[in-house]
Amino acid sequence: MTLRIKQEQGFTLLEMIIVLAIAGLFLSLMLERGPVHSTLASFLQAREALLSTLRTARLDAMTKGAAITVRLDAAHSQLLELSGKIILRKVSLPKEVVLVAPIPLVFQPDGLGTAVSWVLQVGARRLSVSVSPLTGRIVTHDV
């Protein structure tokens, strides 16, 4: 009669260390490159931030009964919503966004706004945003 000794199956400590080292190398390569970046996602995010800021400013002007100004703080890449000299809101834009806003937009208590056109650009995508001087409606056009 022959006795067979059952060998345990599994991974050795050396095999586990090698697998963890390889996984660590892959992870460091992924983190070095940064997250996958999409200009379309940045454009859509910036567009939504701009339009929601303008809509909120118009609504604030009508509910508060005071003129509300929206201007670009290019140094910090932010949109500022102001009531006089008081900052009501700051909205940050993604770094790669170029917003050409030559003069601030001012919404009056009746909902009308200054007839000014701003251009939002991310990569090759461009959007023109303006306010109708007759209705105060915010209008967008792909450029």
Image (cartoon, rainbow, N blue to C red):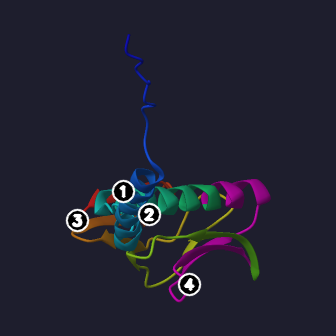
Name the residue tied to disc 3: 143
Q: How packed is label 3: few (under 14 Cα within 10 Å), some, or many (20 or more)?
A: few
Q: Gap between marks 3 and 1, in whole Å?
A: 18 Å
Mark 3 vs mark 1, foreground winner is 1
Q: Gap between marks 2 and 1, in whole Å?
A: 9 Å
First-in-chain label (2 vs 4): 2
First-in-chain label (4 vs 3): 4
Q: Gap between marks 4 and 1, in whole Å?
A: 21 Å
Q: Amino acid at mark 1?
A: Ala
Left or right, 45 with respect to 88, comes to left
Badge 1 marks a residue whose secondary structure is helix
Name the residue tied to disc 1: 41
Q: Residue at x 55, y 61 (%)?
A: 54
Residue 46 rendering spot, x and y as whole percentages: 44, 63
Please provide the residue range marked out in magenta. 58-84
Q: Quadrant of the N terminus?
A: top left
Name the residue tied to disc 2: 46
Q: Is residue 39 above or below residue 135?
A: below
